[in-house]
Image (cartoon, helix red, strand yellow):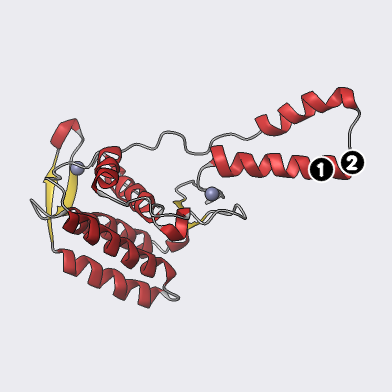
């Protein structure tokens, strides 16, 4: 799937937004304006003006609507939800090379509210994934006790965990301990075996770029 840097950024922003919800992380990770400002700063979102309580409500509502898209049982239903979500935001595609980034398209209208901006950017990015027949690339983490989502941009769609440094590692350790319970090795080997089991995990996509 051909995916541009700004599309990737918009998908990453969407994943981060989805994962702030109580369904994903067990508590509301966007409880107030400082948290919302932190989200905007972390995503390095440009052209975001002063945020208000209205923005906070709107972004949580948008998050719920994106969850609906993800949960849509069929592609036509997902497409309908996406179309309405994007239409409500209003879009005015324009080329920009702000802040030293290469030329890319901003889909949101100049001065758009944060939620409208994210609806346009992430909505269209998700539409492109759907058009490419790659809807499954946005999916749930496979760790049994994790309900976060992630976007798998690996070539062979082999990514399994939301963040290999936590979920992936935790599973490796759990599998190792389970093996130890079945067949405990001699004391002398324990230390080296453990470090090998933990060390075999490698991060899959470290340092995803941000900044649109
Ligand atoms: Zn996870
Ligand atoms: Zn940009």
Q: Position of residue 82 (x, y in %)?
A: 29, 69
Query: Which quadrant is home to the C terminus?
Result: top left
Q: Is mark 1 within 8 Å of ligand 1?
A: no
How far is the residue under mark 2 from the one under mark 1?
A: 6 Å
**Ligand 2 rendered quadrant:** top left
Figure label count: 2
Q: Give the camera-side residue of 183 and 209.
A: 183
Q: What residue does disc 1 label?
A: 179
In the rendered view, does 18 fall on the left or right side of 198? Answer: left
Discs 2, 1 touching: Cβ within 8 Å:
yes
Q: In the rendered image of this protein, does residue 64 appear above or below residue 117?
A: below
Which residue is at the front of the view, 133 or 151?
Answer: 151
What kind of element bears circle 1? helix
Which of the 4 quarters of the picture holds residue 99? top left
Task: Locate residue 91 relative to residue 36 in the image: left or right.
Answer: left
Horizontal and vertical percent position of residue 27: 43, 54
**Residue positioned 42% across, 64% down in the render:** 133
Q: Is residue 212 above or below residue 80?
A: above
- Mark 2 is surrounded, within 10 Å at the Cα level, by few (under 14), some (14 to 19) or many (20 or more) other residues, namely few
Q: Residues within 10 Å of mark 1 (few under 14, many from 20)?
A: few
Name the residue: 68% across, 32% down: 198
| Quadrant of the image occupied by residue 134 | bottom left
- Residue matched to label 2: 183
Q: Picture coordinates of residue 84 (x, y %)?
A: 23, 72
Please give left or right for residue 62 compared with residue 114 in the image: right
**Residue placed farthest to the left in the image?**
110
The reply to whether residue 189 is visible in this rendering is: yes
């Amino acid at each position: 799937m051909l995916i541009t840097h700004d599309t990737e950024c918009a998908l990453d922003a969407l994943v981060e937004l989805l994962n702030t919800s109580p369904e994903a992380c067990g508590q509301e990770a966007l409880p107030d304006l400082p948290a919302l400002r932190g989200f905007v700063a972390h995503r390095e979102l440009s052209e975001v003006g002063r945020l208000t309580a209205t923005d906070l409500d709107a972004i949580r509502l948008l998050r719920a609507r994106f969850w609906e898209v993800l949960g849509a049982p069929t592609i036509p239903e997902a497409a309908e939800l996406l179309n309405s979500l994007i239409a409500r935001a209003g879009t005015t595609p324009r080329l920009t090379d702000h802040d030293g980034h290469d030329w890319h398209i901003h889909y949101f209208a100049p001065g758009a509210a944060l939620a409208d901006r994210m609806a346009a950017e992430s909505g269209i990015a998700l539409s492109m994934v759907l058009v490419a027949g790659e809807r499954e690339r946005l999916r749930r983490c496979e760790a049994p006790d994790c309900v976060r989502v992630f976007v798998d941009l690996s070539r062979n769609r082999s990514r399994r965990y939301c963040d290999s440094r936590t979920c992936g590692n935790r599973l490796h350790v759990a599998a190792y301990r389970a093996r130890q319970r079945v067949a405990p090795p001699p004391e002398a080997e324990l230390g080296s075996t453990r470090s090998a089991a933990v060390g075999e995990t490698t991060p899959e996509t470290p340092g995803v770029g941000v900044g649109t």
